[in-house]
Image (tube, helix red, strand yellow):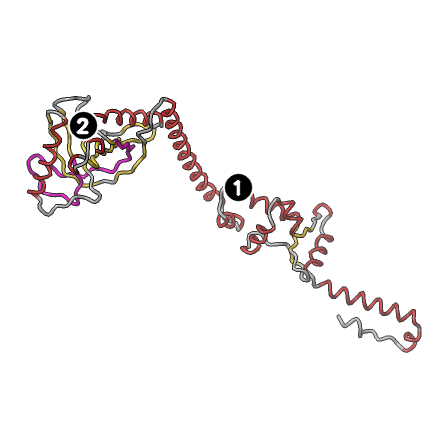
Amino acid sequence: MGNPFTSNTPSDAELFHPSQNLLIFTERMRAAWTILISKNPLTLLLQEVVECDEKEVRHVFYIGEFSKMGKTTIKTLHHYDRIGLLRPAAVDGVTGYRLYTTQQLADLHRIQSLRQAGLTIDEVASIIGGADPRPILTQRRDEIERELIAREDRLARIAFMLSDEEKGFTMDYQATIKDIPSCIVFSKTMTVPDYSAYFEVIPAIGRAVQEANPDLKCATPEYCFITYLDGEYKERDITMKYSEAVEAFGVESDGIVFEEVPAATVVSVMHRGSYADLPRAYAFAMEWIEQNGYRTTGLPRESYLDGIWNGIPESEWLTEIQVPIEKN
């Protein structure tokens, strides 16, 4: 198209008549304006809106209006534009304003639904981009189910603590769940006349292992424990197994064997004080297991963390009760 200000130059006769000159000038101005606005994206978008079928008429909104209708912030829309998740239908070439259509409200709603379901921006972008949503949604469902189980577990623990308070317990004991890794131990099974015999037999086992294995080192951190093999509580003639973790298998002697203890999930209860009061710690652990929906899967372990061998008073002895468990 030629320049509307220079094409179709009027004759001398036309220039002689002022009214004719005004008409020609007006037509040329209209043509020039048409050229200017035809290149504006807003004009193209409005033209598309006008030309579409009446049943599919779409309205155009500036970003502020669109944010109100879509119940989202302008900042979020800017972010979606930057990452290519939801680009505006057009951008005004003069003002730089972003323009959206009613169809994009549906697109925004889908993005919001996926975000509210807990999907990440990358996951939403994958689905919007055409990826199969089922694997993504299935993975998110499984994550939420695990979160719910963990929350229910925490609720049960809180309920148990509150119950203890109501019973007048001083909350001397707390229960925690631990994953104990597998380890190599030397161990010896024996029957002792009473609990006080521990102070003699356990050091003797250690000396025997050291004599047969002078280079053998204890595991780090140190870990030793006793399991009781009698089917009931006994005050005398107690059958027990002493185990201590080491770095490697060694030479066996005098009834001492080396073995690998499998990994276990345990409920752990710390007891500070005399061994005579350990039954209270066991009672607490067993009640906690029952009230929190677990069951025992093995014999309890008594792990001695601090005691008479460190020269501290009996009131400061520290023993950990470990009961292997699994969820009901």
Q: Position of residue 255 (x, y in %)?
A: 8, 34
Please say if 133 is above or below 165: below
Q: Is residue 204 left or right of residue 89?
A: left
Q: Position of residue 131 (x, y in %)?
A: 50, 48
Q: Which residue is mark 1?
A: 116
Considering every residue shown, the one lying at the far bottom of the view is 12
Q: Is residue 295 left or right of residue 221?
A: right
Q: Marks 1 and 2: CB-CB under 8 Å?
A: no
Q: Amino acid at mark 1?
A: Gln
Circle 2 sits in a helix, a strand or a loop, which is it?
strand
Please say if 107 is above or below 26: above
Q: Return the residue nearer the eye: 222 or 42.
A: 222
193 inside magenta stretch? no
Q: Which residues are magenta?
A: 243-271
The quarter of the image holding the C terminus is top left
Q: Amino acid at mark 2?
A: Tyr
Would you identify the image quadrant in which residue 160 lies?
top left
Q: What label does residue 228 carry, if any?
A: 2
Would you identify the image quadrant in which residue 270 lies?
top left
Mark-to-mark CA distance, 1 and 2: 52 Å
Circle 1 sits in a helix, a strand or a loop, which is it?
helix
Q: What label does residue 2 carry, if any?
A: none
The residue at 80%/65% (across/down) is 30
Q: How many marks?
A: 2
